[in-house]
Image (cartoon, rainbow, N blue to C red):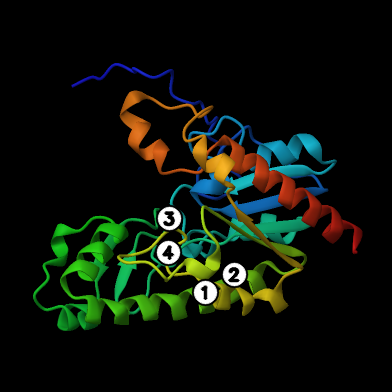
Amino acid sequence: MSYEKMVGEELNYEPCQYGESRLTFRGPQKSLEAPYIAFLGGTETYGKFVPQPFVEILDEAMEQTCVNLGYLNAGIDAFLSEPAILEIAQQSEVTVVQIMGAQNMSNRYYKVHPRRNDRFIGASNMMQMVFNEVDFSEFHFTRHMLGTLCARTPDRYAMVRDELRMAWSARMKLLLNTIGGKIVLLWVADHAPDTALGTSGLGPDPLFVDRLMIEELRPLVADVVEVVASQTALSQGVEGMQFTDLERVAAQRMLGVQAHVEAAQALSKSLEAVLSGT
């Protein structure tokens, strides 16, 4: 069955790869000759549906080349399992690491796909014992699985959530220590990290991460940049974004064009300070 594109044309992301990595990133492909700034992150860094994501805005504004290593639905595991990408980050002048959710990584309860981290591979024996009434074969994505557990067995679900939070902290420390050098940690969302756990259900992205978890990482980084999309940005909805009619619902869940402008502005100030050593 074929579908007509009712809303514009699909955005050309100019997909590219770097080195021996099997991950596909958003282009255009950039030179890795020094000096450059590397940006590691998930869907927001990639800039899904946004013609000019914040990495590209910064690339035009700064002297250094900005290399977009954002990967759709990425968790920490996607980068830890790619030595070629870690090497690129290690050789950069500064590495910006987006704070990604805790749900998309393997842990004691379940495994995710090593690259497509939002894909649920299977439950561990421990998880099957704790949730013996749940048929895990029906799940293909981590969010669907966790949402089901949250709705059916909220008390036991909290055990999984706490495990993910602890695993996230340990995995982030490993990632930051592996990269080394000057690192800027980036929070970019429609809410502040204080409210990450103060909602019903699973909560907003980045899932399960709160301010205390971020503050534990501060000694390992040069700066922490917190970007909370303004009401002006949020009110613009999908204005300026590029997507097909079938992608509209997905686009409505993403941060829009103005949010990327705000992220670029905040990061620009931080990066100038980190690069100058002030």
The kind of residue tagged 1 is Arg
Between circles 1 and 3, the one closer to the viewer is 1
Between circles 3 and 4, the one closer to the viewer is 4
Q: Dot 4: within a 10 Å radius of its alpha carbon, few (fewer than 14), some, or many (20 or more) residues? A: many
Residue at image coords 66%, 47%? 263
Which residue is disc 1 drawn over?
Answer: 171
Residue 251 spot, x, y in % from top left? 41, 36
Mark number, residue 207 = 4
Q: CA distance from mark 1 to mark 3?
A: 15 Å
* Sequence order check, earlier mark of 1 and 3: 3
The answer to whether residue 111 is above or below residue 89 is below
Residue 216 spot, x, y in % from top left? 62, 80
Mark 2, secondary structure of its residue: helix
Q: Is residue 262 left or right of residue 276?
A: left
The answer to whether residue 170 is above or below residue 105 is below
Disc 2 to disc 1: CB gap under 8 Å: yes
Q: CA distance from mark 4 to mark 1?
A: 15 Å
Residue 168 spot, x, y in % from top left? 48, 73
Which residue is disc 2 drawn over?
Answer: 175
Which residue is disc 3 drawn over?
Answer: 115
The kind of residue tagged 3 is Arg
The kind of residue tagged 4 is Leu
Mark 4, secondary structure of its residue: loop
* Sequence order check, earlier mark of 2 and 4: 2
Disc 3 to disc 4: CB gap under 8 Å: no
Q: Is residue 87 left or right of residue 33?
A: left
